[in-house]
Amino acid sequence: MSSAARGAPLAIEGLAKQYGDVVALAPTDLTIERGEFFALIGPSGSGKSTLLGAIAGFVPPSGGRILIDGDDVVAVPPYRRNIGMVFQNYALFPHMSVFENIAFPLRLRKASEAEIRARVERMLAMVRLPGMGGRRSNQLSGGQQQRVALARAAIYDAGLLLMDEPLGALDKNLREEMQDEIKQFHRQIGATVLYVTHDQEEAARLSDRMAILNHGRLVQVGRSRDLYEAPRNAFVASFLGEANLFAVRHMTSTGGGLAVDTREGIPLAALRGPAGAINGAAVMACVRPEAIELARPGASGLDNRVEGVVDDVVHAAGTVRYRVRVGDGFAITVRRPSRLQAEDPGVGERVALSWRADDTLLILKE
Amino acid sequence: MAGGYAWLLAAPAAFLALFFAWPLVRVVWRGFTDPVLGLGNYARVFGDGPYLRVMLNTIETAATVTALCLLVAYPVAYVMAKTRGRWLQIMAALVLIPLWTSVVIRSYAWMVVFQRRGVLNDLLLATGLVDAPVSFLPGALGVHVGMVHIMLPFMVLPLLSSMRAIDGTLLRAAEVLGASPTKVFWRVFLPLSLPGLNAGVALVFMTSLGFFVTPALLGGPQHMMAAVLIEQQANTYLNWGMASALSSTLLVVTLAIYVVYLRVSGGAADAALVR
Amino acid sequence: MTPRGDALARAMRVLLPCFTVLVLLYLTLPSILIVLMSLSDQTYLTFPPPGWSLRWYRTMTEDTSWPQAALNSFVVGVPAAALSVVLGTQAALALTRGRLRFAAIASACIVAPMLLPHVIMAIGLYPVMLDLGLLRSYTAAILAHAVVALPLVFIIVSASLRGYGESLELAAMVCGAGPCATFRHITFPMIRMSMAVGGLLAFATSFDELMLSLFLTGPGTRTLPRLIWEQMNAYLTPTIAAVATLVLVLSLVLLGAAALLQRGRIEGSAP
């Protein structure tokens, strides 16, 4: 698109928000590159909305700086920050037509009638709503309303687009369709996008990088794959996908790696210790369910081996999830691709679980 | 940003401070100082004289009217809550029309009904229930009928809005679980209609305490209520000290009910009261 | 499933609607009586009237005090309603959007004038208006009526503001609208119907208010309810019924207008 804006880099320095004694956001540093699609994820109450609100200008921070394209905007009111924003419930103006909704920011910027007409029509085509300008927002479907909201946020070429759980109200199929559209839209307009969601899968599909928040703190920042493969702590490991977590009692160095003694009574073999020098008590071992091989008892296996009894089997959309009880009843989840007519072990059968030493991730407890 | 709207409170707050709070302060102050500083007025209010009797009668009448309104309004609101479409509109209009008819005029209409040669006596004479016209005025009957008539919509409307907000699936769930219709009503429907009931009771009780027109026209000296007495003290006897002391007493009673209501309803004064 | 309970429920299904019809009759009876009596040809009040005539409507128009009082009611009611709308809307905005810590207490205080007996306010406002030199002026009645009508506007506009949430205004701000532009383009269009309904109810409150008028107006500024009250204490004639009928008609017109506006409000604010 000819009007594609160059994204603005965003830098957050020591940004914090407190309500009385309650810390909504601990001092946080974060840098987002020009044109990057960045996701903020975390459970509700983790501070992601506070962070977004502070960047938009709705929440006055208790301290810190927000630099958009190098300028500190903390003292700038929301209407002068020139940020685009898509709200969770769309926040379309019900008393205005679709056209007027999208034209609203341009009218405030005193654009000429001809320019408004041209730009809104172009934007309507871009969000695949050509000819719908005369409709009222309540005559549109959820997905269409979402596209109007996108168009309104992007029409004035803001360098930074904030999106607050924009797909939260849509059902699953439509949500996936809209994810592709948002990604496409981002490529076309080129703006920096900060996207808040509690859905880690959505974040993984859309974003270049993501940040995970918990209890008002930024826990880890990185690419989806990095976070999954090298989670910093147990929270990240279990928030992104499934994780079998073992409490580590102590670790001893062996020839090629580490021998790990766990509270669950299952000895583990690992390759590397956790990032950062930490005493054993604060460490956990994480094994992803899909890293675990399933075999008959006695069969030769990988570095880590444990036997147990299948407790539960669930077939769902191409994968089989087993819950296997080992030792004193500790349950290990195993996920394998489901193959047609395969002779999978059933409930009550004894199985051997095994995985490679480098699939035992040693991570921080907190 | 957060404080952006807060300053809008300045003008209404100043207005209410000057023309609502300040007058109330003057009333309370005057009750203690006019004609002389002291508790003289209150000694008379709570003494043996007619004043205490009027105050007690006011509270008793307001309580009776509230109870009657609740008994009458609850079934009506229940029927309205179960009705849809045109019939509901007609019923709502019939409830709203009296609300929009002047209180003075409605009390006047009840005079026509209850007077010696009024509608009720005509009816009683015609049916042979009595031989001579009965003297209803002034009397308690007229006051109660007239006041309930005026307050009834204020009980029906909050009840109705509360009942209409009840999720029908809850009632069906209770039925599925084996509760009889009577039990569903007492255990599920009634508790869920309590917000409207509380609002209606508070509204009717507080308004009834200040009734003037109906008791003045239909009640006479035997059934005098506080507002009539206060008006008389001020306008007829020019005894503003006494009028102020009586007003302060009425104010305390009304505010006490208001505070109880706010506690019960969880503090949202505006949310529950209308609509 | 007790059979007794079911029998009771069945009986209620018949009894309750019958009861409701009786209550609705009771509610409408006085208004009907008034209309019929205003058409009586007798000088004393009786029902049913022995004959029909329009003489009391003529009497009413011949006596200049009635039109004067009706005019006074408008001169007081319209500014009182306007003042309540302006102040009530400001209060509603401040308390629903201002994030004030003491919002619950403030809203209880703003609603209070509607709930406290008017006679208390009349006793208090009389000396205040006297001090201000406003006693028996239109201004005194306007200010007093605005105090008791303001809560209605406040309640209705607050409900409307809560109805659509804050995100529309935040969205407008992000789009570049300052506080004034946000109010003009978003808030006002969203709440104007409620403001109009509130204004109508405020006018109706003022139009029906007796106690404050009794204390604060004078012979030249007395409103319709006050004149009806004075006439009623002096002599009961069907003239009052004629006046009452006209007031009733006006009230019904206002009620209809409010109902239409409200319908518009609901349609206008649907998401």
Image (spheres, grey):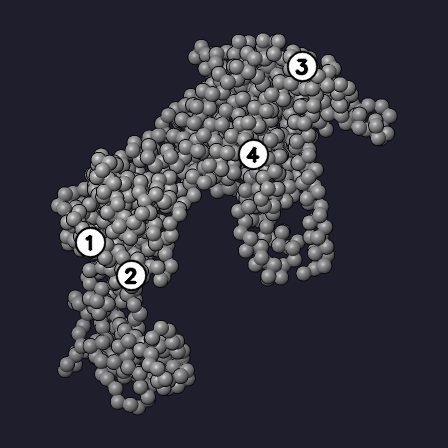
Tell me the SS state at disc 2.
helix
Q: Residue at x 37, y 49 (%)?
A: A140
Q: Are marks 3 and 4 in contact (CB under 8 Å)?
A: no
Asked if both marks, 1 and 2, belong to the same chain, the answer given is yes
- Disc 4 to disc 1, how far (Cα)? 59 Å
The amino acid pointed to by label 1 is Gln
- Disc 3 to disc 1, how far (Cα)? 79 Å
Relative placement, left or right, of B260 versus B94 is left
Residue furthest to the left = A70
Relative vertical location of residue B248 with respect to residue C66 in this rendering, above or below:
below
Q: Find disc 4 in the rendering and name its residue.
A: B203
Residue A90 location, x and y as percent? 33, 48
Residue C231 position by quadrant: top right
The amino acid pointed to by label 3 is Trp
Q: Find disc 3 in the rendering and name its residue.
A: C56
Please state which of the two labelled residues, at mark 2 or mark 3, is closer to the viewer: 3
Q: How many marks?
A: 4
Q: Find disc 1 in the rendering and name its residue.
A: A188
Q: Are marks 2 and 4 in contact (CB under 8 Å)?
A: no
Please state which of the two labelled residues, at mark 2 or mark 4, is closer to the viewer: 2
